[in-house]
Image (spheres, helix red, strand yellow):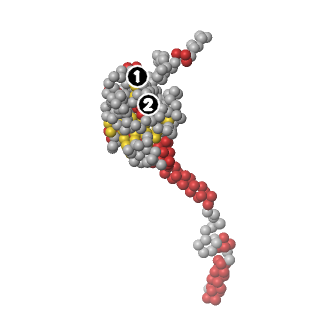
Amino acid sequence: MPSSNSASKSAKAVRAAGKTSPSAKKSGGKGKLPGNRQIPWLAIAAAAVIIALIGALAFSLVPKYREQAELDRFTPSAEKKDPSDQIDGVLKKDYAQGAGKHIASNQRVAYDQTPAFGGPHDSIWAACTGVVYSKPIRTENAVHSLEHGAVWIAYNPDKVDASGVETLSKKVTGKQYTLMSPYPGLDAPISLQSWGHQLKLDSPDDKRINQFITALRQNPYAYPEVGADCSNPYFDRDNPTPFDPAPPGPDAIPMDGTGVSTDQSELGGGGSIPGMPNIPGVPGLPTGLVPAPTPEQ
C-alpha cells in the first residue's frame, strides 16, 4: 500500500505536467480566441459604402416618384376631362366664340383678362415648342398659341428674381407646347395661361405650376384646335412682335369677335403655318417642299 508521502509526490507531478503541456500553451491562456483572427475591415467598409449609396439613391428618387404619383391625379382622361378643377385658384372662362377668329398684325383685341387666355387672336402664333422668350411678346400671338394647346407662363420681371426665372425656365425649356415670357406690369409675380384657364401665383416653387401644366398642356378636352402644331419658324424668337402695354383703343376687336370671320380650317386642327398652302395629310407643308415619289424598283 503506497504511503501518503508518495501519493503527495504523485499529485505534484501531475500538476506540474499540466502547467507545461503543449495543449495548454496552444490554448492561449485565459479567454483568448484560438489563433489570430482578423476583423475584415475592407469588407465592412465596402458594405458601408454600398448602404450609403442605396440610401442616397432612395433619398433622391423617392420624392420624384411621389411627385409623379401626385401629378398622375392631374392627368386628363375621358372620365376626368378637366383635372384643373382640383387645383385651387384656377380661373375658368368659356371662349368658344373667339376660337378661329383671326385679326391682322396691326389690330388689337379688347381682352377681358390680363394676361389674356382666350378670344380672337393674331393669325400667327408664337412658337411654343418649349421657348423661353427674353422679351415680352405680343398678347395676340400668345393667345393663338393657347388655341393650339400650349401653356403660357408669364411673369413680372420686377417681382421674380433671376433665380425664380431660372426655376420657371426649367419647366419650359425644350418641352413641347409650352412658352414663357416676361409680362411687364403683371399684377402677380407669375401667371399661367391655357385656353380658357388661368392661375396666378406668388412663387416659382408653387407645386400648382406642375399640376396646371399636367392638367392642361395639350389636354384634348380643353382647347379648340386639337392636333395643331406649336412650331413656327416664321416667328422671331429673339425679336418677337413687341408687347404693347397701352390699353386697346376704341377700334379694338371685341371679345366676341364681331366683324371677324371664323377660320373653319383651324378648328379642324393641323396647325398650318399662316400664308403657307397645306398638303392633305401633311399639315403646314408647302407644295414646293413635297418630296418627289420614289421610283419603283
Of pointers 2 and 1, the one earlier in the residue sequence: 2
- Name which residue lies at 49% across and 20% down: 276
Toward the viewer: 244 or 128? 244
The image shows residue 183 at horizontal and vertical percentages of 43, 40
- Name which residue lies at 63% across and 86% down: 8
Which quadrant is the C terminus positioned in?
top right
The image shows residue 119 at horizontal and vertical percentages of 35, 30
Query: Which residue does the numbered mark 1 point to in the structure image?
Result: 266
Residue 223 is left or right of residue 22, and the answer is left
- Name which residue lies at 42% across and 34% down: 139
Toward the viewer: 297 or 6? 297
Query: Which residue does the numbered mark 2 point to in the structure image?
Result: 141
Residue 263 is left or right of residue 3, and the answer is left
The quarter holding residue 116 reads top left
Which quadrant is the N terminus positioned in?
bottom right
110 lies above or below 203 = above
Q: Residue 156: tell me if it is visible.
A: yes
The quarter holding residue 291 reads top right
268 lies above or below 85 = above
Q: Residue 83: tell me if it is visible.
A: no
The quarter holding residue 265 reads top left
24 lies above or below 58 = below
193 lies above or below 263 = below
- In the rendered structure, find residue 199 and report the number of the disc placed on it: none
| Residue furthest out toward the front | 250
Q: Tag 2's secondary structure?
A: helix
The image shows residue 130 at horizontal and vertical percentages of 49, 35
Answer yes or no: do the residues labelled 2 and 1 have beta carbons within 8 Å? Answer: no
Count residues near mark 1 (Cα–Cα under 10 Å), then give few for <14, some for 14-19, many for 20+. many
Count residues near mark 2 (Cα–Cα under 10 Å), then give few for <14, some for 14-19, many for 20+. many
Query: At label 2, which amino acid type do we have?
Result: Asn
